[in-house]
Amino acid sequence: MKIRHKILLCISLPAIIAILLGIQYIRVQIDNTNTSHYMQNNIIMMADTSDLVTSLQKERGLSSLYIGNKIDTNRENVENQRKETDKLLSIFNKSIIESHVSKEPINKAKLSLDKLDSLRVNVFKAEESASILFQYTEIIRDLMGLIKAAVKGKTSFGLGKRMTNLTLLTEAQENAALFRGTLSGVLSANKPIIETRLETLINLRAGTIVNLTSPALILSDKTDEGVKSLIKSQDFKKMSEAFQTVIVKSKQGDYNIDAKEFFDTVTRIISKIIEIQNEEKKILLKETSKIRNESIKTIWFTIIFALSIFIGFSILTFFIVQGIIQPINKTVIALKDIAEGDGDLTKRIDVKYKDELGELAEWFNIFIKKIQAIITEIRVNSQKLTSSSSALSQVSNHLSSTAEEVKSQSNALSSNAEHVSSHISTVAAGAEEASASVINISQMTEKMSRTFQDVSQFAQKIVENVKEVALSSENMSDGETQISAAVEEMTASLNEVAKHTAEANRISKDASTRTTGINSRMDTLVKSSKQIGKIVGIIKNIADKTDMLALNATIEAAGAGDSGKGFGVVASEVKELARQSTEATEEISEQIEQIQKGTNEAVSAIESINHIIKDIAAINETIAAAVEEQSATANEIAKTISANVRTVKEVASNANESSTLVAKIAQSIEQSSQTAMDVARNVEEVAAGVNDVAKSTSESANGVKEISNTINIISNAAKESSKSATQTDLSSAELSRMASLLSELVARFKI
């Protein structure tokens, strides 16, 4: 990006921001214009709706008068008012098309107006006005809902509150119209009224006054004065007086008030309210029109002002950019001439400005002056460099030839030294190998000697071990003989135990049989004791019955008087006998219970003993079986031990023979070990001589290697010198070329 473009971009950013802000401001003004236009259309719609509501209110009141008094005049008035309503209805339908209100209240109002034709037909058929008034009121309320929806629409500049005035005045008009129609019907009928209708009249009058005096009613001075004069007017007083008369005479009727005159009075009040509404409508329309016109003027003024600023800003930007770019272009042209042309370093930029660009041109002239001096000095030095590089090239050529000669001689010496060194290395290697072989033989002989010694010692140990084995075998033979005798004794003991165990088993089985017999006898004893218990129970029952008989006899004897005394004595004796029988039976019963308890315990004990005896018998059987197995095992052990005794004796005999042979082997091994030691000593002496030869040869080889290394160093130095000389020659040639090139470059500049 060029500097021109960057400067334009930097200058344009604030301009772009200003333009965007201007566009935003214009958009706001356009929104205000549209809002004022919407408000204007809504106010017109509200005015047309209010006129339609007024006409419907009149039609409702006249219809109520006609229903109360069906005369031709009233019918004619109703028909004329309907024509007026139809005209206003067509105007209303046009205004709602251009309004900006939500569709819901508009559709609701249209549906209500569609019912108007059927309602009008019913007016001439009705005998009672209440339902007709209600249907008219529903239509009017839906239209008033449309007015409220317009107030809730898009507004600005505080006009929404002023539009609320139309709503309040329309509600006051509606309440007054309902009050007019309802009370006119009452006065026309001239009859008592019910409480609900009276309450309706009170609410309608109160609603009218509240809407006219509401704090939310923000009117102009003119309309506010009109509302105050209306409340203080004679018509308002007449309406209030008629209302008071109806309240006083509501129960008997006969109000003596002309219904037509009252209707006209309230109509004048409603007309005054309508005048106030129309005045407010005019004010609102005037203000919205004023706001719209001012917004349009503001938009045009903003557009013209923005265009003027843009044009002036563009001209100013052009001159500013030219003032910055021209000095820069001159500097660029001068540098371009130096870079692409003949390199005239004598040219300078004319300094005409006192700003940063003038300072840039001044410092540029200083820079070119310094470059001119540097180029002059380089030209002189390049000539000197050319002559010096030629001399350096000659020296490097001589050095290169000398280095090549030294290199060839050192290579010949190095090859001879390497040949001698290789022969000496071969001799040294052979000596080292011989020394190593002799040393290995010596080490192997020593190992063999040590091995013979170990074998000899091991043979001696074998002799000792064989002797110990023989001795142990003899001892084992004696021990096994003793074990055999002990096993035989154990076998005899086990046989004896088996006999006693069989006897114990027989006794246990006999005891178990006897306890079983005792147990059966004890069961018989328990059964007998239970039978005795039953008999004792029978005796006790007999004693109880005898006691009862004795008691009865005593009672009978007492009833018989003196003649029954003898019988009473007998009864007493019988009673005493029964008592003694009862005590005896109770004592016998207790003893039998103790016997039964003891018998049961004995039976349990005998059963436990029987179980124990059976367990003992089972254990005896197990012991007998184990003893039989142990006896058989002991017999086998005895047989095995006898065989072992014979084998051990044979081992002892063989061990003695082995001991004699091993002793002879040990003597032979000791002689072989001594011979191996002598061989090892002779081999060590040979190894020492070979080592001396190897050392001498190694020292000779090291000397030759050092000579060869020195020659190699000289050869390498000669090679490096040759390379350096060659490199110096190349460098001097390159230096000469660069000096020539530098001279050519410097020659391009005009100094």
Image: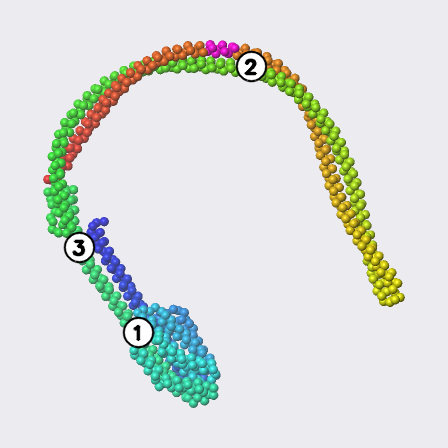
Label 3 is placed on what type of residue? Ile
Q: Position of residue 111 (x, y in %)?
A: 43, 73
Q: Is residue 675 above or below residue 198?
A: above
In this view of the protein, which residue sits in the foreground, 474 or 177?
Answer: 474
Residue 353 located left or right of residue 535: left
Over which residues does the magenta segment extend? Answer: 667-676
Marker disc for residue 463: 2
- To which quarter of the image does residue 219 belong? bottom left
Q: CA gap, disc 1 to disc 3?
A: 51 Å
* 1 or 2: mark nearer the eye: 2
Residue designated by label 1: 285
For the C terminus, give its image quadrant: top left
Q: Position of residue 175 (x, y in %)?
A: 40, 79
Q: Is residue 86 visible?
A: no
Which mark is first along the chain, 3 or 1?
A: 1
Q: Is residue 669 magenta?
A: yes
Residue designated by label 3: 320
Residue 537 located left or right of residue 618: right
Q: Is residue 301 magenta?
A: no
Q: CA gap, disc 1 to disc 2?
A: 149 Å
Q: Position of residue 699 (x, y in %)?
A: 31, 15
Q: CA gap, disc 3 to disc 2?
A: 130 Å
